Amino acid sequence: MVDKETLVDWDKRYLWHPFTQMQDWLAEAPVIIERGDGCYLIDIAGNRYIDGVASMWTNVHGHNHPELNAALKTQIDKVAHTTLLGYSNIPAIELAKKLVELTPVGLNKVFYSDNGSTAVEIALKMAYQYWQHKGEPQRKLFIHFDKAYHGDTIGAMSVGGIDSFHTTFDSLLFKGIRVFAPEAYRSRNTGDSAVKTQWLNAVENALSEHRGQIAGIILEPLIQGAGGMLLSPRGFLKELSALAKRWEILLIVDEVMTGFGRTGKMWACEHESVTPDLLCTAKGLAAGYLPLAATLATDEVYNAFLGEYRDLKTFFHGHTFTGNPLACAVALENIAIFERENLLSRLQPTIAHFRNRLQEFNELPHVGDVRVCGFAAGVELMKNPDTNTPYPFQEKVGIRVCKEALNRGALLRPLINTVVLMPPLQISTSELDALLDIVYKSIETVTE
């Protein structure tokens, strides 16, 4: 067993952490997780932390879940991996059937990959190639939204809208049409129907200006995650879908974060009865156990790729671990747990309790807004909420709140000055209350 001091030394000597200023990291004492137990993570010193962000929004049923563990162990005794390029495997087939049954009617084909970024890349490439096969190769542009986050690969960044993440790579990105929300949306008055109308008008203006050139529209349905947990106006997704149909362009929904019960339904687009042309899922798909993603397509999209081999209509895209049997076996058990435990129905009182408790945060003088969608929330901290004055970036207020929460027994991750709350769906009410109490006190301590 490697001792704690050696692990810390090796981490700082050899690891480069994502989305982390490593100069800061090298000056700090890292938390190194050793094991998990339900909604708790335990570090190498034996400290227990409530997992307040579901290990980067992936964990559904808790850590070290016996039934998920058993599914993984059963599959590993059969085969760990076999390629899907030219061959198939049982868990991948069974999961594809299950995903088609689980998603909105009309999404009948499943293409596997490894993570959310790759699921989005696939959707973009499918949409692009679809129009080539339909005899409209000039359709090369994608409409996407300000503050959107779809991943960190080149294509996913090209349809993103977070300048601090993407501006550095501008010269590498392909051209798209970035639609900005009305000022009222950015000021968090998202319930106003006028906001929805203005936003839809901006999309339609882009469609009109680039008539015949648009391949598709991509968005995170209901809530933008990494952009700050920003909520769309009610009905926006539904009307955007109608707009896409009217203009005969493809609608892509990125359900990487919102899928698998996070918004209170299995898929966010179910809240507004929308069936997209392409749907991307990852994160919760394998319950936080293994990397697995899928892009689901309609028959209309899929059929455009059918033809003689010499026609070169094949979708030339793939990943080494596409349809990995271990990940697919865990994903199947993940879905089985949803069904056996009637989880979505059972989750509704917890969501209501979550929403009610979060209203208490509005009492804190430096909380500018509390945004909640199902079992996902963002608490935005502001220097002066009355004048809409944010904390300066360099003050690292969100990071400081998360460090305070860590000292109190909760593991969080900020989006600059927005503290994200996204615990495992299976968290108990008492554990949820403990988490919310920690976050409340941490915000109060840091901002007083």
Image (cartoon, grey):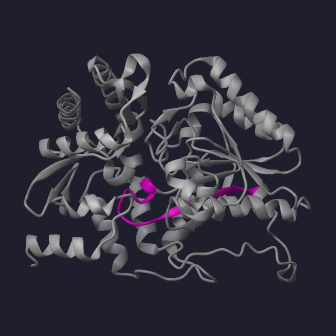
Image location of residue 168, percent across then percent down: 55, 58
Quarter of the image holding residue 211?
top right
Image location of residue 332, percent across then percent down: 44, 61
Please state if 323 lies on the left or on the right of 5 as rendered: right
Q: Which residue is at the front of the view, 3 or 266? A: 3
Query: Magenta span has 244?
Result: no
Give the farthest residue toward the right. Answer: 135
Residue sitting at x 60%, y 64%: 154
Image location of residue 398, percent across then percent down: 31, 40
Image quadrant containing the C terminus: top left
Q: How many marks?
A: 0
Query: Magenta span has 298?
Result: yes
Q: Which residues are magenta?
A: 283-299
Q: Which residue is at the front of the view, 388 or 53? A: 388
Image location of residue 183, percent across then percent down: 60, 25
Q: Which residue is at the front of the view, 126 or 175? A: 175
* One can see residue 342 in this view: no
The vertical placement of 388 against 118, above or below, is above
Quarter of the image holding residue 199?
top right
The vertical placement of 164 against 421, above or below, is below
Please state if 5 lies on the left or on the right of 275 as rendered: left
Quarter of the image holding residue 429?
top left
* One can see residue 192 in this view: yes
Q: Which residue is at the front of the view, 388 or 217? A: 388
Please state if 259 lies on the left or on the right of 233 as rendered: left
Residue sitting at x 13%, y 51%: 48
Image quadrant containing the N terminus: bottom left
The vertical placement of 130 against 313, above or below, is above
